Amino acid sequence: MRLANKVAVVTGGASGMGLASVLSFAAEGAQVVIADFNAQTGNAAVETALQQGLDVSFIQTDVASEEDIEAMCEHALSAYGRLDVLFNNAGVGGAIGPITETTVEDWDYTFDVLAKGVFLGMKHGAKIMRRQGDGGSIINTASIAGLSGDAGPLVYSAAKAAVINLSKSAAVELAPDHIRVNAICPGYIATPLTEGKNPEAIKRSFTQSQPWPDYGRGEHIAGVALFLASDDAGFVTGESIVVDGGSTAEGPGRTRRFPQMAASNSRYSGVTKGSTGADNALRKRDPGESDA
């Protein structure tokens, strides 16, 4: 049991990479708090885990709210008595469409969830771990979109680049407290956030978009998260581990691989809110319309 006697919190833990990590952590002996904006999928995730005999609980959490993050951490303490692992994984697709049509509100929403949410998780998780005095592990979900200029939508990519740098900076600051901080950079992973209405077509596209002949799954991310959460990674901090089937080795070239995803070809601009349960806020646009 690699996480025996450890308590973990996973944000965005109700589906996709987060749920796969929750189940992996709990199967390795951890008591796990599922924190998610979507109460319906959160409660369903608890049922799934309990059916497997795993020790989990759920708290509805908006990671962009400091009050919610504080409540999430207090829930871990009140339910299980401590906090050893914090996986800041919650995410949304966020702003899409051309930069000339991106509103400040779309930018702010995207950064609130993807960057501020990670900052708040690290801030309050580190306070508890430092007070406990025996270290801990903080893991942040970044993306290959934060590593280049053509692996994701513009605002999403900027937010994920911020997560990578936040992770490195926090790793240096928290090292004296034996708190390790690392980021995971997923590539094209088939999850409810990415699959949309045609999951089989997405899986085929993802498989064809990388050198590795199989599409990425949440379990691939969970395996790396489990390593980073465990004592096996006891000398690993400040790293950004790419899990992408060789995409960045070849060069992601998202708009070349998926021309329909290029901002200039998008039928919409606005923000997508993924598996949060909240409605997307999209505006239909004419791809041929000039910005002039």
Image (cartoon, helix red, strand yellow):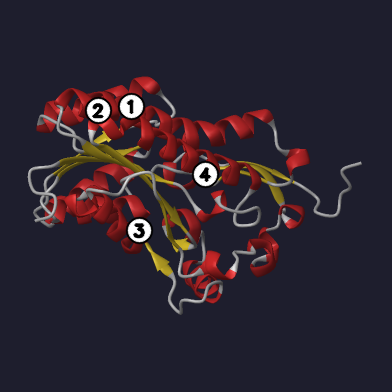
Name the residue nearer the viewer: 246 or 206: 246
Q: Residues within 10 Å of mark 2 (few under 14, many from 20)?
A: many
Callout 1–callout 4 Cβ contact below 8 Å: no
Q: Is residue 87 visible?
A: no
> Does 152 sit left or right of 64 as displayed?
right
Callout 2–callout 3 Cβ contact below 8 Å: no
Of badges 1 and 3, nearer the viewer stands: 3
- Residue 73's tag is 2
Q: Which of marks 4 and 2 is nearer the N terminus?
A: 2
> Does 176 sit left or right of 221 as displayed?
left
Q: Earlier in the sequence, mark 1 or mark 4?
A: 1
- Residue 69's tag is 1
Identify the secondary structure beneath mark 4. helix
Name the residue nearer the viewer: 125 or 217: 125
Residue highlighted by disc 3: 221
Query: The disc labelled 2 sits on which kind of residue?
Result: Cys
Quarter holding the N terminus is bottom left
Identify the secondary structure beneath mark 3. helix
Name the residue nearer the viewer: 140 or 37: 140
Q: What residue do we see at 11% from left, 46% from top? A: 55
Judge whether 238 appears above or below 243 on screen: above
- Residue 160's tag is 4
> Does 97 sit left or right of 241 as displayed?
right
Q: Which residue of the protein is positioned furthest toward the right in this rendering?
A: 292
Q: What residue do we see at 18% from left, 22% from top? A: 131
